[in-house]
Amino acid sequence: NSLADEERLLKGEKIHVPYRQSKLTRLLQDSLGGNSKTLFLACVSPSDANVSETISTLHYANRARNIKNAPTKNMDAISLELQKLRSFNHVLQCELIKARF
């Protein structure tokens, strides 16, 4: 399978996603294993003629659903330092207001 070994998923083991095995996983590489939140929409057909494609899509969507990401906000060092200084400035302003009254 292109996404993950389901037995290892059930055990809670960390899983390597082999992106080169499928064009779709290669296209979704940043979303499936990267630093992002992803919405996966699986389009299926009610037609009997497309049953194998529908089943394949549902299996893929189920495996994609089991991948867990921990996205974090990307911030450079300067932005992070500015945010800290602004919050410190706010704290000092609050203390100054309290000291006046």
Image (cartoon, rainbow, N blue to C red):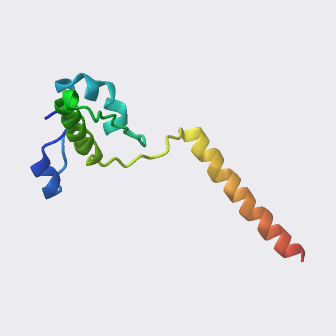
To which quarter of the image does residue 11 belong?
A: bottom left
Q: Position of residue 21 (x, y in %)?
A: 16, 26
Q: Residue at x 60, y 41 (%)?
A: 79
Residue 79 shown left or right of residue 12 in the figure: right
Front in this rendered view, residue 54 or 92: 54
Looking at the image, the residue that sits furthest to the left is: 7
Placement of the N terminus among the 4 image quadrants: top left
Q: Position of residue 25 (x, y in %)?
A: 26, 29
Q: How many marks?
A: 0
Residue 33 lies, with reference to residue 85, above or below; the image says above
Q: Residue at x 33, y 30 (%)?
A: 28
Residue 7 lies, with reference to residue 27, above or below; the image says below
Front in this rendered view, residue 71 or 52: 52
To which quarter of the image does residue 64 belong?
A: top left
Q: Residue at x 18, y 44 (%)?
A: 15
Front in this rendered view, residue 51 or 42: 51
Looking at the image, the residue that sits furthest to the bottom is: 101
Residue 94 shown left or right of residue 36 in the figure: right
Q: Residue at x 29, y 33 (%)?
A: 45
Q: Position of residue 87 (x, y in %)?
A: 68, 57
Residue 32 lies, with reference to residue 25, above or below; the image says below
Placement of the C terminus among the 4 image quadrants: bottom right
Looking at the image, the residue that sits furthest to the top is: 23
